[in-house]
Amino acid sequence: MGHRRGSAGPDRHAAGQPCGECARRDSGGTCTSFRGRGVDYDGGWSQYTIAREDTVVPIPDVLPFDQAAIIPDVVSTSYAALVDTVQVRSAQAVGIRGVGGVGAHAVRLARMMGAAPIIAVDPLPNARERALAFGADTALDTGFAEAVLRAIGGERLD
């Protein structure tokens, strides 16, 4: 087993840490006094920084660092949007506008959650192709409202 590398920790806030002082927690278990690294304290763009042990997790040696590095931002952002904000459920129609890094991972996560159909919208052909490869049922570039209605048979998106 090689050396241990760290990534964002258990409080689902990749770029910071819970205050460690309050006992108040919202319904999602997130610290209500969250402090952002590089905003509320130093270290956001530093080459090295000190992090509390409870804000890091080991990256398995089989996971390349460049892939692990996107998890705290791209994956957790799209996950929080789908789970906490939108509360996607199985068999719900989902539209994702903008399928760059965050949006493409939102497509993949929505597919894992059982959303259907998943409609991706992006003006860039390569982004639409990536969305289809990640699990979108349809990838659209123009005429958003009309095309979405056609793609889901006149129903509305959940």
Image (cartoon, rainbow, N blue to C red):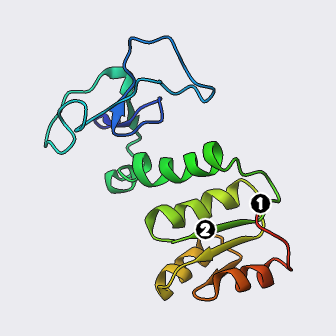
Q: Residues within 10 Å of mark 2 (few under 14, many from 20)?
A: some
- x, y percentage for residue 12? 48, 35
Image quadrant where residue 107 sits:
bottom right
Q: Residue at x 47, y 24 (%)?
A: 31
- x, y percentage for residue 78? 53, 54
At mark 1, the secondary structure is loop
Report how far apart the C-alphas of labels 1 and 2 lie in the structure.
12 Å
| Amino acid type indicated by mark 1 | Asp
Q: Which of 60/34 is in front? A: 34
| Label of residue 96 in the image | 2
Q: Residues within 10 Å of mark 1 (few under 14, many from 20)?
A: some
Q: Residue at x 77, y 51 (%)?
A: 89
- x, y percentage for residue 81? 57, 50
Image quadrant where residue 117 sits:
bottom right
User: Is 19 displayed left or right of 103 in the figure?
Assistant: left
| Label of residue 119 in the image | none
At mark 2, the secondary structure is strand
- x, y percentage for residue 110? 66, 58
The answer to whether residue 55 is above or below residue 103 is above
The answer to whether residue 104 is above or below residue 138 is above
User: Is 118 displayed left or right of 8 in the figure?
Assistant: right
Q: Report the number of numbered marks.
A: 2
User: Is 42 displayed left or right of 139 in the figure?
Assistant: left
